[in-house]
Image: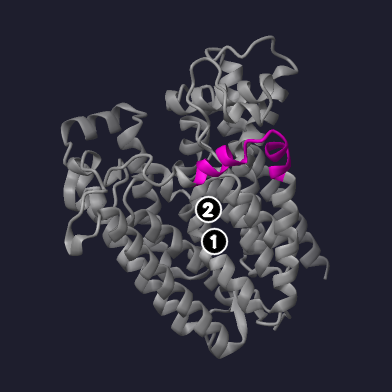
Amino acid sequence: MVGRAVRSMLQHRAVILVLVVGFAWRLWLSPATGYHGDVWAFQTWAKGAVELGVARSYVETVDGAMLPNYPPLSILLLGATGWFYRLFAASFDTEVVAWRVVIKLPSILADLAMAALVHRVLLRNGTKRPWLGAAIYLAHPATFYDTAVWGQMDALYTAFAFGGLVAFVERRFALFGALVTCAALTKAQTIVVIPLGVALILAAGVRPLLRAAAASVAVLAGVLAPFAWGGVLVSAKNAYTGSVGFYPTLSSSGYNLWWALWGFDANRVNDATRGWLHATAREQGWAMWGLCVAYVLVVVLRHVRARREFDGTLVFFAASMCAYSFFILNTEMHERYLFPLVPLGLPVAAAWPRFRGPYAAATLLYFVNMLGVLRWTDVDRALFDSFPSVTVFIATLQTACFVVSLRRFSEYARLSPRAGAEPAAFHPALTASGANV
């Protein structure tokens, strides 16, 4: 008993140290200019939300910026960030380093939240060193490059989605509904986990469904209230409907299947051009992704029906495959759209050694993909400038990694759970009615 308490205390001290170091590392990197267009847009949207109000900022612009094309909760978070900065700054000068650091803070804090959640999942799974999972997440170059260097907000919606799945595994169904709704109200890319989330909560039973639905409606009403009051709900809706076709190319610098097939032309060919079976490339991509998601859902629901339980690791594995297939198979993919795979796949890799190789390869290739768009060091500049065709090689490897990962998902579903299998890989599990087993 005493030894267990001591180990628990040391583990918590270790994860706190990991979080502090991870935060300090990101703060040190955050003065970087990053991707100027993205950082500048977030700064001006935050300024608009402060000076015009969050509702009016959807239909009016400041400093010549484009109107916001992000969902309502993102605008509220940017507005809160702007108000925080306004407490100690006289103006929103985009060249001031402090403003650049502050605008990146929400994503940096989301990174820390995700690392803490990874630790929580691994701790519940019985992993010996759960703090190591948090350290791997925070030290992964794909995470700190996206948030602290690039200045993007991918960590925000991913943290909500990841937290929602953790809540589901822990039978906190109201929290699951609230967090997944927050994710959907932060960025349209949350669609990668929405079908799985709906399938899971339907399979969990009527009471969990009602709890999740009630929490979802409450969050939806609270977030949309200021925009409804300001009469801009149609503009908020356009943040979703306008996301498809906003960059109508086969690939917007995402090294996926389309890039592997078309190379640099993928960045120039319109994905609305009709081809095979008179379907557009966009329609073909959505169809392939839909089939892949349908397969993932069938596997998960068949597992639930056969064993009357939800295997926590299988839930994260399924979410990983939904996110991975979204990036690989769809057109119009940006290089950053694979971000959710990093946290979603980490508990799986920690629990099941056969996924560690594909996970490491996929997430590191994703980081290299970002370097192909926003160069960081002389090494990556030399690589992409001297060997432009390396992008096709990376896209081909990434596509192959996806195929291997999907096979690993099928293998895991067949093995989980069975006598003699590694127990840490298969817990926590829930009965379909919501009880621990």
Residue 54: x, y in percent?
66, 30
Magenta stretch: residue 232 in it? Answer: yes
Image: 90 above or below 346: above
Residue 82: x, y in percent?
66, 24
What span is colored magenta in the figure? 223-240
**227 lies left or right of 65:** right
Magenta stretch: residue 36 in it? Answer: no
Viewer-side residue, 9 vs 326: 326
**283 lies left or right of 1:** left
Q: Which residue is mark 2?
A: 190
Render colour scheme: one colour
Label 2, secondary structure: give it: helix
The amino acid sitting under disc 1 is Ile
Q: Residues within 10 Å of mark 1 (few under 14, many from 20)?
A: some
Q: Quadrant of the N terminus?
A: bottom right
Q: Is residue 7 among what the camera can see?
A: no
How many discs mark residues in the rendered view? 2
Image: 356 above or below 408: above
Q: Which residue is mark 1?
A: 194
Q: Residue furthest top?
A: 90
Quarter occupied by residue 425:
bottom right
Viewer-side residue, 368 vs 20: 368
Q: Residue at x 61, y 14 (%)?
A: 92
The amino acid sitting under disc 2 is Thr
Residue 37: x, y in percent?
43, 25
Contact, mark 1 vs mark 2 (Cβ under 8 Å) = yes
Label 1, secondary structure: give it: helix
